Image: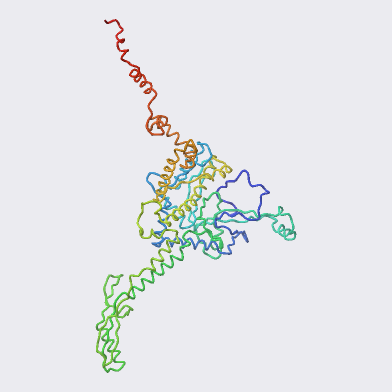
Amino acid sequence: MSKLFGFSIEDTEPLSPGAVSPIPPNNEDGVDHYMSSGFFGSYVDIEGVYRTEFELIKRYREMALHPEADSAIEDIVNEAIVSDSNDSPVEIELSNLNASDGIKTKIRKEFKYILDLLDFDKKAHEIYRNWYIDGRIYYHKIIDLKNPEAGLQELRYIDAMKMRYVRQQKKKPGDKEKELVRINNRNQDPMNYDFPELEEYFVYNPKAMYPTSNPSHSGANAGVRIAKDAISYCTSGLVDRNKGNTLSYLHKAIKSLNQLRMVEDSLVIYRLSRAPERRIFYIDVGNLPKVKAEQYLRDVMMRYRNKLVYDANTGEIRDDKKYMAMLEDFWLPRREGGRGTEISTLPGGQNLGEITDIEYFKKKLYRSLNVPPSRMDGEGGFNLGRSSEILRDELKFTKFVGRLRKRFSNMFNDMLKTQLILKNIVTPEDWEIMSEHIQYDFLYDNHFSELKEAELLNERLSLAETAQPYVGKYYSQDYVRRKILRQTDEEIIEQDKIIEDEIKKGIIPDPATIDPATGQPLESAADMDLGQPQMEPEIDGSATEAPEMPKGGEI
């Protein structure tokens, strides 16, 4: 275990030796605890963090099997991943990237290659659902170690229960002596402080036996150490700051789901016990002694009591009189002088149709998962009115899904970084600058987004029409396009080119030939020249010139 498996991507220009900090880096990845090597190099997990993570992932997966939780999860996944027969669920957006067209083309090509490796068009729903439920996802980036320039060969999914992220402090020779010097000399120069050096890697254990208390029994030493850059690791972004665990978005719904289960079970038990009507038999025993009265009551009960039982194992119906259930009738003795033998009916439970508490806990479950309660069982229908009529819950849900998409895109970013650096398209230094301007566009299937965009475009066009008389006087055309229509530089260049092409092809008229005041086409210059000579002879007296026309000597 002293050797790492995989590959590492390192910066050619590391951080300056003077830029140091006593605070270890925190990547918000849920690995805030540091494992240090001890006796025989075994790993010490005092808090039982990994055992807790294992149990949490197991609980999350059990929760996803519950119908109500599954319905809410499906709403989230279907909203985030939109499958289309023509388009890919996600595309890379490079409009904000300041790079040449050749580099952009290569980046788009490599991203398409990564999607093909993941088979994302077909498995997008499954991949996203696994990430959402577990709260993390791992992919092993397999390359040809003899020919790394060929790039990624395979992206292999790893079960979250079999992988763990380790951040370990490196032990150096002479650390004890340095510690003693540090204790004895407290006023030393801070720059002479021996800052801890951390080693980050993943440990893969195919047995997935983390819940044991003893790390040696859990196979910690038998795991395979894999370099950090060889694994694509994406978390939900939720971290329990007290324990350092990475949480799933299902974590908030644990209590709500358990409450819903208990209320449903108690409701079933209540209905089974109180729903049937039971009869009360009052048997007249006369003056019989107590023992004989009880014997007589038992004889009457066995005579009239008939209990037919269906045996599910054999498919037979048999008479089973030796069992007395709580749902059966009551037999009570009555002494002489009473009203004699009597049979009365005990009514069943009332208000069995009340499920207000069930609906409350269902809504509470949906709210804990950030899903609008109106989506529960199709409540509220589907409104295609103005966007102002959209519920605030739907707006919050759309923003929540947008945050999930942005977090999930970190996986694409990591894979794309590895592919571009391996194929020498970019350097690690260039990637640090470029990654901030690379975005990922997911397909939208939310009617609210469409309505909002349509209404925004309508309002912008109306505002541009209102500002048209002031263009050239107070505002420029460029100002209208940038500030009112909100067009980017790329959109302006693209639209100008398309408009020029359509004018050349005759699809749209040339604006130079349109009167801006009336919107009607202007008369051509040739038509204007032809019209004036026709008018002048009528005004100047063309009748005097008519006799001079036959000048050819015909007469």
In the rendered image, is residue 260 in sight?
yes
Between 165 and 266, the one lying in front of the other is 266
Q: Quadrant of the C terminus?
A: top left
Q: Quadrant of the N terminus?
A: bottom right
Q: Is residue 462 above or below residue 541?
A: below
Between 174 and 391, the one lying in front of the other is 391
The x and y percentages for residue 313 are 31, 70
Kindly indicate the quadrant of the structure image that contains residue 265: bottom left
The x and y percentages for residue 284 are 26, 89
Image side of residue 499 versus residue 204, left or right: left
The x and y percentages for residue 447 are 39, 50
* Rendered residue at 46%/64% (across/down): 254
Between 260 and 130, the one lying in front of the other is 260
Kindly indicate the quadrant of the structure image that contains residue 180: bottom right
Between 41 and 552, the one lying in front of the other is 552
* Rendered residue at 32%/80% (across/down): 324
